Image (spheres, rainbow, N blue to C red):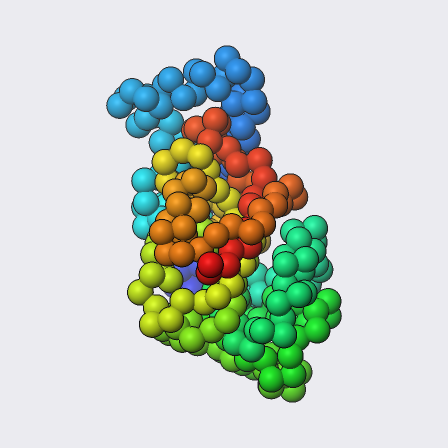
Amino acid sequence: MSELTQHTIDMSILMRTPTKLRDVQIIWTAKMFRAFGKISSGRRLIEGTGRTRFGAAILGWMLGYRRSFRTLDEAEKAVKPYARGGHENPENATWHLNRVAGTSDYAAFYYLRDRLLCVRKIFDLGGNVGNLYYCYRDYLHLREDVVWTVYDLPENILRGRTLASSENVKNLRFTDDLRQAGDVDLFIASGSLHYFDKSLPELIENLDQRPKYILINRTPLTEGPDFAIVQDAGHIRVACMLYNRSKLIADFKRLGYGVLGEWQVAELGVPVPDRPSSTVGAYTGLWLEHL
């Protein structure tokens, strides 16, 4: 190995080290804030400090990408150096494919089972490589002529098409065009709604034709103002929105939808270290129908 090559490698390691050290500092600071925020006095101190300009600046520096943000774009920029590939990480697709149906999925099955004969076209928002299709087909009697379209990022679309071809799956389609949701019977946003900077009613409002059924599952909702946070799933870190539940339902109602079912996803939650009162202890699932 030449001296120049060795020098280049050494410099690369040195350039990465500050980011790694900063990441470790953020992780441990967030853990301490989470523990402190579970105590009423600690919660008051953290949130009181955050209401002052100087205090908010200090908390923001200490927590880095683990603080709350006004917009999804701000959160995405903050976590980018630490994202580990984000949604495009191949490990994320593998993780989703290996996930078995959970309690929240069985809640969804309850509403789906009696309506599947009326469902021929399905649009799966943020469906990765089609993991929900592979999971649900083992539990539900889908129509033989069902067309299940997954909307996702180009890298995941490519992986999804390759997987579907290898599995000889004919019912699965992939797209990066949201307009293809304009002629479907069922719109699914399972574990994906919070990754978009527009709420689902905003996305659906401009479609040529609105779906009869909407399934929202595994999404964090808040009763306070909308804001963004970063999820740390271990293998990836991704920015997400916490939408106001009451406003979300009111916006759906304005579009003619009624909530026929709601359930809690107790196995999932998202901490908000600098706003402990806004921590989401359980995600939410909703079944809506156009009335």
Is residue 228 visible in the rendered image? The answer is no
For the image, the number of numbered tags is 0
Residue drawn at point x = 29 percent, y = 20 percent: 52
Q: Which residue corresponds to the image point at 65% horizontal and 83% vertical from the top-left? A: 144
- In this rendering, is residue 65 above or below 130? above
Q: Of residues 253 and 159, which is closer to you in this image? A: 253
User: Is residue 230 visible in the rendered structure shown here?
Assistant: yes
In this rendering, is residue 277 above or below 108?
above
Q: In which quadrant of the rendered view does residue 115 lie?
A: bottom right
Picture coordinates of residue 53, whole percent (x, y): 26, 23
* Residue 70 image position (x, y, % from top left): 32, 40
Image spot of residue 99 (x, y percent): 68, 60
Q: Is residue 260 above or below residue 244?
A: below
Say left or right for 65 vs 116.
left
Q: Kindly identify the residue that appears in the image at 33 percent across and 72 percent down.
A: 208
Question: Which residue sits furthest left?
Answer: 53
Work out whether 20 lies above or below 212. above
The residue lying at 66 percent from left, 65 percent from top is 114
Q: Position of residue 172 (x, y in %)?
A: 56, 79
Q: Farthest residue toward the top?
A: 41
Q: Nearer the viewer, residue 162 or 104?
A: 104
